[in-house]
Each structure stands twice: as structure tokens, then as C-alpha cells.
């Protein structure tokens, strides 16, 4: 790696100003231990503070600066707390706007049980590959406007979009990921009632299965998948589906694995990627040093892995693996936040992970969980 990467840092709302700096500290520690150049961090406004100061939760200067970054860390947003006039404007929420503007078409959300963390299931290790630009979330699929409108005060319409190129892109990423993991793809759909929209998904998955003879394909209806995920989560490897289904199932998987606060997430496009944990802004605990930073920390690790793959940089890949190993080691030692049965605060847990990464040999290249 010849030079440091330029990464944006957007704190967001609620617990964002606590968990995003925690992830930033961990990234810095992991890269330092791996002997990699330091990140050039670019601090940029997003969320309620940006709305108050700049008149928009995602100001134009923020978008302009992010275009010059390799990727960024983004905290959660609490758009429900924004002024009514903004919420009535039909604008996309900050996360949706970032996905739209930068073409972050694929959302990867892994969920696995971790040592020392009480889970609702004995074992699981899966990744949800969520098509991120279309589907039933109307704010993701329109060039202009939100895709949600009311012809009369008593009638609301929502536009859902399914295109073959977007479906094919998500499906191929899922099969490539499964080939590096345990060799199984589960397509979640509703083709029994939405024949045309999910017919595209079935066609593309079957075509991808022919191209990947080493990867098994199963198809499961969305409602049945919710039940099967609760009963036998260990049977799933890579789950691929549309936007809303993927959001719902990945949240369920995160809770089954211990807590949604443990769930990482990266939104990736062709040129940029955004690390943004799966959880929300949790305004009820903001500023109390009790938020779980794991979701944001492992999201940052996923961003390092994406950068490492995109730039063929094994040092970044090693740093990503080191973060995952350090988080597991700290949790196994009994240091955890209260949402998963521990007593540590946000800062204390982050300190423990940074200390683990700073120990001799902590960031040595290692073989991690495939595709994690």
C-alpha cells in the first residue's frame, strides 16, 4: 500500500457521535499495527446538526467532499426528529440519499454469533446480500422524487421497481460470496404472488447457479423465511433478496445473533463504499456512554475489507481481519456493553479493542471467516 486512504467521517444523530469516533479509533489502531499508512480523515456534517447549520441534513459540500473519498463512516440518522416541514418535503433521508447519489447498489449485512455474547440461537453465520437501489423502498428507485405520492388525501401510492440489471448484479455478488464461504445461496422472494417482479430474481439465480456448479441454490418465500430463520438459522450461508425484505431479515438475524447493536453493514457501489451499522440512532441512550460500538466497528472493518479487495491490498485485508479478531477476543474476555449482558461503556469497550490491536502481532495476517 503506497499511500493512505481518504475516508469521510459523518457522525450523524443520536449515538452516532459516540460510535463513529469509536470505529475511527479502531481503524487507526488496526492500520498502525499492520504497518499501513494512516487514513486521511475528512470530517463532514450530516444529520440534525447539519440541518440546523446548513439548512439540509446532507449539505451539498458534504456530497462534494465525499466524491473525493475512497469511502466513509456514517452514523445513524434520526429523521423522525427533523422539523415537520422537512419531513413533509419528500426528500430522501440522509442514508438513502447517500446510497442514491453514489450508486451504493449492494448492502452486505453479516450476522453471526460471537464468543461471550448471549444469543437467542446456538450458532449462526450468514450474510444477507440486499439489493440496495430498487425494490419496495420507493426512495431508492427514483431519479427525482421519493416514489411515494397521494393522488387524494385518502389514497397513498408507492412505486416499486425491479430491473434485470440490478437483480443480476446482486445475484452475482451473492454467488461469488457464497463460493468463498460455504457454497450456498438462499433466494428470498414472493414469486407466488408477484410473478413478474420476482420472476426476474428466479431467472437470474438459476442462471447464476448454472455458472457456479459448486454453489447450491434454494428458494424460500419471504414469510416462510422469517420462520425458518428463527428455527434453523445455522442452515443459511448467503441470503440474497430485494431491498425491504433484506432490511427486515437482516435485522431479525442480528437480534438472533445477540443484539442489533452487534450487526455490521457496508453499502458498496462500483467506486465508493459506506460503513453504516444496521442499527438506528437510539436517541434514548445518546450521550450516556452506554451505546454498543460493535456494529459500527465491524462495519468499518468491512469497509477496510472492501477497500483491500478493490485495490488488491492485502494489508487492508489483514487489518480488517485483525479488527474482527480483536472484537471477538474482547467479547470472549467478558468485556461487553450492557445490551449484551456486560457492564462496559462505549469508551471502555473501545479502549479494550484498541489495546488488543496494539498488542504485538495483533494485526498479523490471518485466515478469517470466509467472506466475513
Image: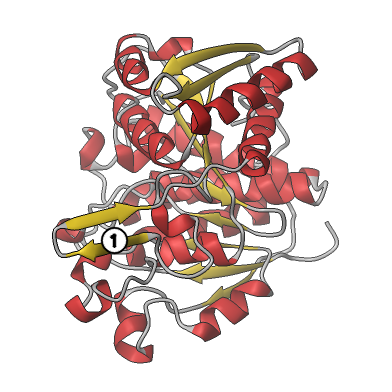
Residue 25 visible in this rendered orientation of the protein: yes
214 vs 139, left or right, is: right
Identify the coloring.
secondary structure
127 vs 345, left or right, is: right
Q: Residue at x 69, y 74 (%)?
A: 68
181 vs 339, left or right, is: right
Residue 76 visible in this rendered orientation of the protein: no
Q: Is residue 221 above or below residue 315?
A: above
Q: Secondary structure at mark 1?
A: loop
Q: Is residue 135 above or below residue 168?
A: below
Q: Position of residue 120 (x, y in %)?
A: 26, 19
Q: Position of residue 299 (x, y in %)?
A: 50, 47
Quarter of the image where the C terminus is located: top right
Query: According to the image, label 1 marks what residue?
Result: 15
Q: Position of residue 125 (x, y in %)?
A: 48, 21
Q: Residue at x 80, y 52 (%)?
A: 311
Amino acid at each position: 500500500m503506497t499511500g493512505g486512504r481518504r475516508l469521510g467521517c459523518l457522525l450523524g444523530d443520536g449515538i452516532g457521535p459516540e460510535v463513529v469516533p469509536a470505529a475511527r479509533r479502531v481503524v487507526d489502531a488496526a492500520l498502525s499495527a499492520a504497518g499501513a499508512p494512516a487514513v486521511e480523515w475528512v470530517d463532514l456534517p450530516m444529520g440534525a446538526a447539519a440541518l440546523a447549520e446548513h439548512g439540509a441534513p446532507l449539505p451539498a459540500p458534504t456530497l462534494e467532499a465525499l466524491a473525493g473519498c475512497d469511502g466513509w463512516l456514517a452514523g445513524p440518522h434520526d429523521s423522525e426528529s427533523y422539523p415537520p416541514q422537512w419531513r413533509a418535503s419528500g426528500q430522501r433521508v440522509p442514508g438513502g440519499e447517500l446510497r442514491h447519489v453514489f450508486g451504493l447498489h449492494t448492502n452486505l449485512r453479516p450476522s453471526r454469533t460471537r464468543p461471550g455474547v448471549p444469543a437467542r440461537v446456538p450458532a449462526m453465520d450468514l450474510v444477507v446480500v440486499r439489493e440496495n437501489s430498487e425494490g419496495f423502498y420507493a426512495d431508492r428507485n427514483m431519479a427525482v422524487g421519493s416514489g411515494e405520492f397521494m393522488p387524494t388525501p385518502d389514497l397513498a401510492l408507492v412505486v416499486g421497481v425491479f430491473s434485470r440489471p440490478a437483480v443480476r448484479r446482486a445475484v452475482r455478488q451473492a454467488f461469488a460470496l457464497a463460493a468463498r464461504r460455504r457454497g450456498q445461496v438462499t433466494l428470498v422472494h414472493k414469486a407466488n404472488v408477484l410473478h413478474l417482479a420476482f420472476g426476474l430474481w428466479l431467472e437470474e439465480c438459476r442462471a447464476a447457479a448454472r455458472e457456479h456448479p459448486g454453489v447450491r441454490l434454494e428458494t424460500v418465500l419471504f414469510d416462510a423465511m422469517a420462520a425458518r430463520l428463527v428455527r434453523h438459522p445455522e442452515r443459511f450461508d448467503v441470503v440474497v433478496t430485494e431491498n425491504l425484505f433484506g432490511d427486515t431479515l437482516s435485522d431479525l438475524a442480528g437480534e438472533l445473533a445477540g443484539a442489533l447493536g452487534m450487526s455490521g453493514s457496508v453499502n458498496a457501489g462500483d467506486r465508493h463504499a459506506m460503513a453504516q451499522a444496521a442499527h438506528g440512532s437510539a436517541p434514548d441512550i445518546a450521550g450516556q456512554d452506554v451505546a454498543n460500538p460493535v456494529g459500527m466497528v465491524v462495519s468499518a472493518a468491512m469497509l477496510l475489507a472492501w477497500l483491500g479487495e478493490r485495490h488488491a491490498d492485502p494489508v487492508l485485508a489483514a487489518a480488517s481481519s485483525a479488527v474482527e479478531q480483536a472484537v471477538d477476543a474482547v467479547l470472549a474476555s467478558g468485556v461487553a456493553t450492557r445490551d449484551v449482558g456486560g457492564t462496559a461503556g462505549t469508551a471502555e469497550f473501545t479502549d479494550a479493542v484498541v489495546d488488543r490491536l496494539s498488542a504485538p502481532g495483533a494485526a498479523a495476517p490471518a485466515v478469517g471467516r470466509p467472506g466475513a
